[in-house]
Amino acid sequence: MEPMANLTKEYFDKRLGDLATKDDLVHQTDELKAYTDEKVSELAVMVQRGFESLEKQLDVRKEVEDLKRQMKQVREALHIR
């Protein structure tokens, strides 16, 4: 390591040259934003499909409840149970 007196701009440029530049970080940030937007969109589609599936299941439950109510009315009309 060089003595403190010998530290120069060139030395710092050489030692710090491998660090990311502001432009590098801006580019990486833009890529990360695009990636995040894509994944959020994919997740939104997955959630929507889940809700659609759940809605279909709930529709079937309503039909079953209607059928149960109708069966009860038939049993009462026929004096069964």
Image (tube, grey):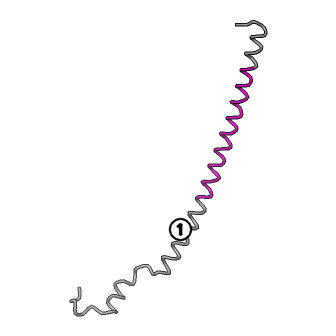
Q: Residue at x 71, y 20 (%)?
A: 68
Q: Is residue 21 above or below residue 33?
A: below
Graded by Cα atoms within 10 Å as few (under 14), some (14 to 19) or many (20 or more), the crowding at tag 1 reads few
Asked where in the image residue 30 lies, by quadrant, the reply is bottom right
Instruction: Give 36 or 19, whichever is nearer the viewer.
Output: 36
Quadrant where the N terminus lies? bottom left
Q: Secondary structure at mark 1?
A: helix
Number of numbered discs overlaid on the protein picture:
1
Asked whether, in this view, residue 38 is left or right of residue 20, the answer is: right
Instruction: Give 1 or 41, whichever is nearer the viewer.
Output: 41
Q: Residue at x 75, y 11 (%)?
A: 75
The span picked out in magenta is 40-69
Mark 1 lies on residue: 32
47 in magenta: yes
At label 1, which amino acid type do we have?
Answer: Leu
Residue 52 position within the rendered picture, expressed as x and y whole percent measured from the top left:
68, 43
Q: Is residue 80 above or below residue 44?
A: above
24 in magenta: no
Q: Residue at x 65, y 44 (%)?
A: 51
Asked whether, in this view, residue 3 is left or right of residue 53, the answer is: left
Instruction: Give 44 or 79, whichever is nearer the viewer.
Output: 79
Q: Residue at x 65, y 39 (%)?
A: 54
Instruction: Give 76 or 18, whichever is nearer the viewer.
Output: 76
